[in-house]
Image: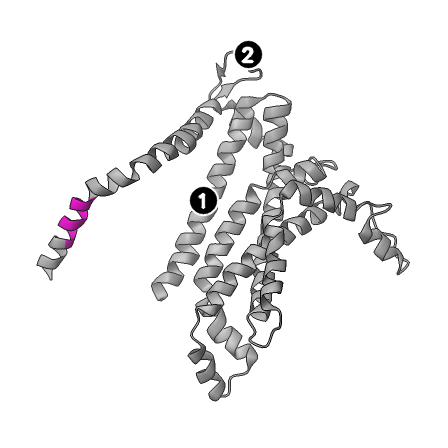
Amino acid sequence: MAITNQFIKKRKWGDLPAAFFFLFPSLVLIIIFSFYPMAQTIRLSLFKWNNVASEPVFIGLKNYIYLFSSDRFWNSIQVTFTYTFVVTAVSVLGGLLLAVVLNHPKLVLTSFWRVLYFLPTVTPTVAAAMVWILLFNPNYGFINSFLRNFDILGPNWLSSTSWALPTVMTLGIWRRIGFTVIVYLAALQAIPKDYYESASMDGANAWNLFRFITLPLVAPTTVMLVILGMIDSFNVFDSVLVMTRGGPSGATEVLGQYLYSDAFTLFKMGLGSAIAVIILIITASVTIFQWRVVGLGSYEEQ
């Protein structure tokens, strides 16, 4: 056994030059377009640079100190976490339920329904946001027109501090749930049908089949979707920019919108870089925590 382990280790070390040779072009691209800009952003976050024509002035951690003492920054943190939690949770849970329905053998036009649910995922965000603005228009939008049929006066959705964020979140859920459905469908179809047949013969009902077979076997897929969903939702920007620009009164100002308005509207490049670094740290921390505490445990048990 020891000889076998030594042979495997030597084999692995011997494969490194070949692996490095084939990976070298990709590594160069990753370094140029990912790691170098990331390093420059971290460096720039330590400078004050308010104009493209001026020279950056080193100020140390003052950008971070300013952010952590700013009510606007903490509001954007709260809005971002609220958006991320709601969109991820609803899209994952809703996607799983829809995938179970679409995976039913008696469902007709299966391919049509799958394509229909996946279309929002490939729809450009800006185009979808423009449609959402029309749908939720307080005067002639479809939503308020529909509510008026029941003598309900709909609010001014995107101008209300109470309804603006939920309206933006519905767009995020609508765009995310199609991807979740397709991934869950692939996971469900990989489960052997023998499991369900054996459990049914033992008297298990539909809820027991879902709880004790489906949920445990799609757990790794759920972990992956939660991680991807949180990363995608935490970096939301384009839909907020088009629909509300962070308003009203900061009700929808996520970190991405805060970064954009400071860095590219007010030209506070150093402060914008500090926000970008904080987004990176939070996203990486949440992902590592989920992977180590939730994801790794699921795989070890299997």
* Distance from the alpha carbon under mark 1 to that under mark 2: 35 Å
Q: Is residue 11 magenta?
A: yes
Count of numbered circles in the view = 2
Q: Main secondary structure of the magenta part?
A: helix
What residue does disc 2 label?
53
The front one of 232 and 60 is 232
Residue 110 in picture, x, y percent from top left: 59, 68
Q: SS at mark 2? A: loop
**The residue positioned farthest toward the right in the image shown:** 151
What residue does disc 1 label?
285
Q: Is residue 156 magenta?
A: no
Few, some or many C-alpha atoms within 10 Å of disc 2 (few <14, some 14-19, many ≥20)? few
Examine the rendering and report whether any part of residue 86 can be seen: no
The front one of 29 and 56 is 29
Q: SS at mark 1? A: helix
Q: Is residue 23 above or below residue 51?
A: below
Q: Which mark is residue 158?
A: none
Residue 131 in picture, x, y percent from top left: 73, 45
Few, some or many C-alpha atoms within 10 Å of disc 1 (few <14, some 14-19, many ≥20)? few
Q: Is residue 232 above or below residue 264?
A: below
Figure quadrant of residue 134: top right
Q: Residue at x 46, y 57 (%)?
A: 223
Q: Residue at x 47, y 23 (%)?
A: 44
The front one of 112 and 122 is 112
Magenta range is 8-15
- Amino acid, disc 1: Ser
